[in-house]
Image (spheres, helix red, strand yellow):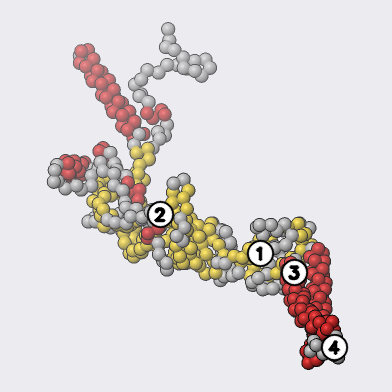
Amino acid sequence: MKHLFRKVVIVLVLVLVVGGSAAWYIRRDNAQAVAFRTAAVTRGDLLVSISATGTVEPEEVIDVGAQVAGQIISFGRDAGGNTVDYGSPVEAGMVLAQIDDTLYRAQAAEAAAQVQQAQAAVQTAQANLKQNQARLYQAQRDWDRAQKLGPLSQALAKTTYDSYQSAFEIAQANIAVSEADIAQAQASLAQTQAAQQRAQRNLDYCTIKSPVKGVIIDRRVNAGQTVVASLNAPSLFLLAKDLTRMRVWVAVNEADIGKIHAGQPVRFTVDAFPGENFTGEVAKVRLNASMTQNVVTYTVEITTDNSSARLLPYLTANVKFELNRLDDVLMVPNAALRWTPSAEQIDPASRDAVKTRTADSKRPGGANPPSAGRDARPPSASDPGTGRSTLWALEGKYVRPIPVRTGQSDNLTTQVQGEGVTEGLVIVTGVQAQAATQTADTTNPFAPKFPRGPRGGAGGPPR
């Protein structure tokens, strides 16, 4: 009896040890289990596009400068009587600023006096011509009478005959001199008139006027500031001709520029109005490319309507050029096409089939269907096409493969087609390991435990 009792005790101890160990291993595996990140197959419209970043610009910008040097003494007034400033509406010909014109006004007055002096010189030369013409007339009559009498006449001395002839020839020469004096005086008059026009124009330049109707975007000078015009005219104001029409200047990579053409529809957003979409179309593709760090980009101009005046100049625009639009198609996140499970995560019923397909694909001439070890990547929007990939549907704590054909992508989702792919199908996009809830849960209950030390530290085994 005593021997039988000992055997029963031993059996019970063994059962407790085996059961406790099994429970510990189960709890340890549960603590290290993985949770699948999932998503559902959706049906909707897919927009295939090229993404880029640009800047909102006024359609036509005019830089108003100064052609003369001087001090800004005042600014003009807008229609409301306020001093022109940022955002002020202006009309064509409206005074924007006034430069001190004291020196230029003096130069204009001096030039005007020189013109009057030159005009007087022309009149003097013309009067001298008339006098010389009268002298020529008298000298010619005297010379004609002397010729009728002849040089050998008793009534006319030889010296008198010669003097009449000389007087006539001198009168003719004086006419030529008077005509030359008139021409010289007229040339001098034209020169002084040109100088007067230049001085008057410089005087007019002291008053800065708006060349067009528009809105002041930027005022770059203040009253009392001196502007100096040299080789480059100093910029005073920046005007936008029409803010109801805006343009977006977008830098497009050379790999995508071949897909951009005039008239192409565009959608874009700005950070100032999150969630609001603006539309436009491509106006032109500029041919002058730029290179930054060996990356070649082209500037694309997009026109957009701004009748609402919500778009402000120089906002950053996130642009999407529409390449294609697919309506009512099945779509999955791109992460679902990139993820591949480990062998232990695949449903046992599907595991052998996957291995068989993998082995067949490695044989020459064999098919190459997607398998568990294949990293399937969707085609990018810049190179739309079709391909084959694999989705992994959730089956309890395992996943099973679903072969699909991939279509075009918008860089976030991809069109898929395949047998067994339906709207709402739950697919795996990744895994996330679950941390153990408590450290004690993964501790072997049968490991030796030692009492704590006097200060909470682990004490050694009792001696």
Q: Nearer the viewer, mark 3 or mark 2?
A: 3
Rendered residue at 32%/28% (across/down): 24
Q: Residue 161 appears at what percent x and percent y?
A: 82, 85
User: What mark, if any, has residue 195 been given in the picture?
Assistant: 3
Q: Is residue 28 above or below residue 331?
A: above
Q: Earlier in the sequence, mark 4 or mark 2?
A: 4
User: Alpha carbon of mark 3 to alpha carbon of mark 1: how far?
Assistant: 25 Å
| Residue on which disc 4 sits | 156
Mark 1 element type: strand
Check if mark 2's residue and mark 1's residue have beta carbons within 8 Å: no
| Residue on which disc 2 sits | 254
User: Alpha carbon of mark 4 to alpha carbon of mark 3: how far?
Assistant: 57 Å
Mark 3 element type: helix
Check if mark 4's residue and mark 2's residue have beta carbons within 8 Å: no
Q: Earlier in the sequence, mark 4 or mark 1?
A: 1
Check if mark 3's residue and mark 1's residue have beta carbons within 8 Å: no
**In the foreground, 154 or 116:** 154
Mark 4 element type: loop
Rendered residue at 42%/7% (across/down): 463
Three-letter code, disc 1? Val
Badge 2 density bin: few <14, some 14–19, many ≥20, Cα 10 Å: few
